[in-house]
Amino acid sequence: MGDGGFASRERKGRIPELSAIAASVRREILEMLGASGSGHPGGSLSTVEILVSLYFYKMRHNPGDPAWKSRDRFLLSKGHAAPALYAVLSRCGYFPGAELSSLRKLGSRLQGHPDPKKLPGVEIPGGPEGIGLSEGIGMALASRIDGLDNRIYVLMGDGEQDEGEVWEAAMAGAKFKLDNIVAIVDMNGIQQEGKTSEIMPSGSLLEKWRAFNWDVEEIDGHDFDSVIRALDRPPKHGIPRAIIAKTIKGKGVDFMEGNPEYHGKVPSKELLDQAIRQVSGR
Amino acid sequence: MDIKKTSMREALGRSLVRLGETDEKVVVVGADTTDSIKLMEFGRRFPSRFFNVGIAEQNMIGISAGLALSGKKVFCGTYVVFLERAIDQIRNTIAYCSLDVKIIGSHGGISVGPDGGSHQAIEDFAIMRTIPNMKVIAPSDSESADMLIEKAGREKGPFYIRILRPNLPQFYDSGSRVEIGKANLLREGSDVTIIANGVMLGEAMDAAGLLEKEGIFAEVIDCHTIKPLDLALIEKSARKTGAVVTAEDHNIIGGLGSAVAEALSEAYPVKMRKVGVRDVFGQSGDGRELMSAYGLDSANIIRNVREIVNK
């Protein structure tokens, strides 16, 4: 797999730095949500290691030239995790960190759900679930037409797997033999109204994606070694890749972890301060 | 009147091939109706820029959005009633980001015929024209369809273009001037303005011919662009005639008639009547028979004209 000792050592060498970034991103997510007073903490916190691995380790991108044609693209299909994306994009330099506190406010570029017309670095509009993978397929097809060797990464939620369009897109990815796309499922086990296993049981997502002819693996979505190892694995020729990342909703804040209540609710000032202390290791 | 009838779908196929020849950014996405609506003409010619996604309209729109976000100029389409499954994707990707995607809705209206009410879209103008950034076009013959589709392909931003199943009488030729957003005055008159599009333009022209025999001179406007509406021409004609009848193969709620009424009520209110489907679903039958049964014919236009013209 080309995963020799050197690659492995290099990967591991980056982990302390990535972990430090992840801690800052978690803090910024919570501060942003505190400032806005509304938004989605749980599903933002579950994505952090995945986003940090993509933007600070794996992806070929240039914050100075967000429209660079050959860039790798990250598509946040679960658009309610916007705060995580914004924290990562500003840290990369796509826009000033001072803007983070404008989240969800009138006139802000940081919309409640991302808007690519407003904010540099945002690739697709967020909002209704289930559309991002289709857009990723479209971009992967465009890259093929244009002879580009970039990769398209699409992050979905596990609740989002309820949407039929996800599976329409999954079939299309296999039909068009797109080995330049990677679908990542943030499997935090919770959707708006409760556990995914109760709201709409998906069974084994690994088996489902495999049955749709994707090259699938399941990983620990909070373990950097596991995440970047999966991202580094070269694609199989003509086969799209899916990564099922087992995560914890609200990761890093004890009262939010695994708690459906914090899908779309910002905690009280007191609890928020407590949460910020926890993710900052204080 | 014995006028040559031609196919709008074949016009679509021709204009897409022309666009594909001159612009390699043009791509086409279809959903298992590609031969029927002639998207396949493009596919045969440019197979690497043509994608059939199967019976998956939401995915068709999402993929089209992705292609457009990567700089492609996208045409996609299927039958209108299937397309309407993907209104969410049309609103939240293509319109929301004002993407270069031209959406073709084929088989609009009850004139589709025997497939029945499930396949007769009578609400698409209403839905599409209320979505910001979306332009809405409903050509009335194959020649103007050919020109409008090509012009839309060379303009930025999203379009919804409704084309029709039946062969239609031809009102334009290759020398005609047809522009997006500019209605065409096809017949001058002084007593009433009939504003029509699609399959109803032929009925409007027939009605005008028959009305002339009873001394009523009708002006006929082909309003092929519903949004942006050519208020300048419509208002000018309304000021001249003082009476307007609209005619469309669409629900009288929210379509061409509503668009005209909304605009004139602010600009220059006149007596108006709307000819269209009166808020009911269609049924199986021959297209012509259905049009008469639902009041989409020259006879009903004439009845409505008589109601508001003082002669």
Image: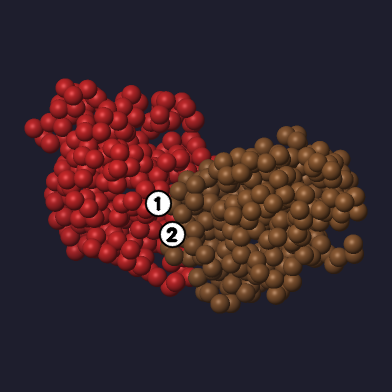
Chain colours: A red, B brown
Quadrant of the rendered image containing residue B291:
top right
Residue B35 vs B295, above or below: the answer is: below
Residue A215 location (% of width, % of height): 44, 54
**Which residue is rendered at x = 52% and y = 56% of the image?**
B158
Which quadrant of the rendered structure holds the C terminus of chain B?
top right
What is the x, y in percent for residue B136? Answer: 60, 53
On the same chain: label 1 and label 2? no
Left or right of B70? Residue B255 is: right
Residue at image location 35% in from the left, 58% down from the top? A73
- Residue A250, quarter of the rendered image: top left
State yes or no: discs 1 and 2 in contact (Cβ < 8 Å): yes
A185 relative position to B132: left or right? left
Residue that carries the numbered disc 1 in the rendered image = A124
Q: Amino acid at mark 2?
A: Leu
Dot 2, how many residues are within 10 Å of its Cα: few (below 14), some (14-19), or many (20+)? many
Mark sitting on residue A202: none
The answer to whether residue A63 is left or right of residue B24 is: left
The amino acid at mark 1 is Ile
In this rendering, position of residue B206 left or right of residue A203 = right
Q: Secondary structure at mark 2?
A: helix
Percent from the top left, x then y, of residue B21? 58, 77
Q: Which residue is mark 2?
A: B69
| Residue pictured at 59% horizontal, 52% vertical | B231
